[in-house]
Amino acid sequence: MSRSALRLLDVPNDPQALAEAVGTGMYSIDPATQAMGVRLEMIAPGEARMSMTVRHDMLNGHQTCHGGFLFAFADSTFAFACNSRNLNTVAAGCTIDFLAPGFEGDVLTAHAQERSLAGRTGIYDVTVTNQNGKSLALFRGRSYRIKGQVIGEMPEI
Amino acid sequence: MSRSALRLLDVPNDPQALAEAVGTGMYSIDPATQAMGVRLEMIAPGEARMSMTVRHDMLNGHQTCHGGFLFAFADSTFAFACNSRNLNTVAAGCTIDFLAPGFEGDVLTAHAQERSLAGRTGIYDVTVTNQNGKSLALFRGRSYRIKGQVIGEMPEI
Amino acid sequence: MSRSALRLLDVPNDPQALAEAVGTGMYSIDPATQAMGVRLEMIAPGEARMSMTVRHDMLNGHQTCHGGFLFAFADSTFAFACNSRNLNTVAAGCTIDFLAPGFEGDVLTAHAQERSLAGRTGIYDVTVTNQNGKSLALFRGRSYRIKGQVIGEMPEI
Amino acid sequence: MSRSALRLLDVPNDPQALAEAVGTGMYSIDPATQAMGVRLEMIAPGEARMSMTVRHDMLNGHQTCHGGFLFAFADSTFAFACNSRNLNTVAAGCTIDFLAPGFEGDVLTAHAQERSLAGRTGIYDVTVTNQNGKSLALFRGRSYRIKGQVIGEMPEI
């Protein structure tokens, strides 16, 4: 059976079904996102929403959530949003602004939305909020599409 | 014994000795930096250098080091540099550009240097390199000084 | 007559009327915004919309609108939005992403919206579009409130 | 005569001579940089230094140099540095941090240096200082190489 035939069998045509299949597939091979306890709540073409509980081992010396983990959480959500069309895409660069601290036990939500997609590059905004709806961080990611697909490709023989 | 008397006993006057004492003190109460296995290699006024080995649980779905962990590593180094004068300082915002991927087992070095310090705000550049000296990421952090000191303060009663 | 009495006479209480008075007042003393031919189309608390026609002397060596003028246009709009409550506010830093080129004669619109305001610092997003509604640039500005008001203060004697 | 033969005649082989030829050529067709009164002081492969005097029509409502003109000045210097190898290159995005105000009559210097160049993308840092050596702004630009050369190409017939 040819490789392209296999692909047609494996990958949904419907954009929403494809996004969900990509989400499940990416999550299953993403050790960092799993290790942070991040949960994929929603994925759609160009969009994703995830949640994460702030653990003790995510605190910094000020006993608030380490900015690196707020970033990593936003960055994962960005990654799922920008790969949601099943085209391999990586982060070229990101900016984050910290608005308020997170604390141990806080349940955070990150919501990534596509602001622009042209050629190989896209811009995504991610907002991180806590369980009270307070915004903790605003993140903007620049994506760059590379070769390959996220799911549905056979290993080359 | 008065609080200020205690502080004089506990905190070095020499800027380099103070930076080293701050580094040791911050590290001991920073669960996130410890949990990532980050090692503090050098600290000086306005400067810090740290190292980190990329672990399996830091990989993303592309099997390269999750950008969030490159960021968190740079961000920790930034935090140690901008707190090195024993004045409590937090990150207001950061920008990162990803230049090349990191892989499992890579031994990364982050070097933070102060570019500007005026009033309560500072700018710090951090370069993340791998064991071959290749640059993986350029990070720029904006710091904001808040109340209090990092070490040498008694808990309020 | 006391200074505070004068201020009460001069400055509207209604937030929308105040924003409009600030817009008129700022524009009249802003040579750069005037020299670029920027027009203030709308101002409200935390928001502003301006327009600008791309002139020949705004072109770069690629014969497209110089990124600096796209930035300056977005930055002016940001400035009007973040000063709209009549509290003197300056830019601490900004990020811009260029999505598509502008050409001579294009009529551009910049729309600034407040994303966050806490203490002395705010985050504003500005979108620059052309006459066809195409997005040319996404701008994010970080504001910092300083002493004084924009309008209604008497010069100190 | 063929197009490639013409190119060989027109364009220097030596990287420094090429950078200088590109600088002269770019400047001559860059209306915005000329209109701002920017002077090209030095250009080398991956590097440029320019100067600019702050004029009245560059002031904002606070009577300091409009951040957009500090940006535009840094952005021009970045453009000359990233095109200095005679490969057409545009800005993808930029970040600027404002450290201190500029005033009318100040003579500013912008110095752009390449921090990274890999594939089509590069990172450049630009520092803007005044006549006293005080840093007014730190700028970081992300470049993207497109088709074509800056100088030495014949118009297509």
Image (tube, coloured by chain):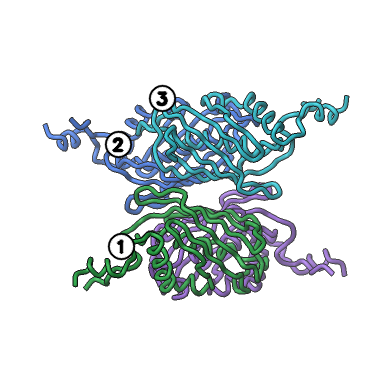
Chain colours: A green, B purple, C cyan, D blue
Residue at disc 1, secondary structure: loop
The x and y percentages for residue D39 are 44, 29
Q: Quadrant of the C terminus of chain D?
A: top left
Tell me the residue that label 2 is attached to: D150
Q: Amino acid at mark 2?
A: Val
Mark nearest the camera among 3 and 2 is: 3
Left or right of C145? Residue B127 is left
Query: Is residue B125 at least partly visible in the picture?
Result: no
Left or right of A14? Residue B71 is right
Q: Amino acid at mark 1?
A: Gly
Residue at disc 2, secondary structure: loop
The x and y percentages for residue B140 are 53, 53
Q: CA distance from mark 1 to mark 3?
A: 42 Å
Residue pushed farthest front? A14
Residue at disc 3, secondary structure: helix
Mark 2, other Cα within 10 Å: few <14 / some 14–19 / many ≥20: many
Query: Is residue D94 at least partly visible in the picture?
Result: yes
Which residue appears at 35% of the width and 34% of the height? Answer: C62
Number of marks present in the image shown? 3
Mark nearest the camera among 1 and 3 is: 1
Determine which of the numbered discs, if any, sits on residue C56 in the image.
3
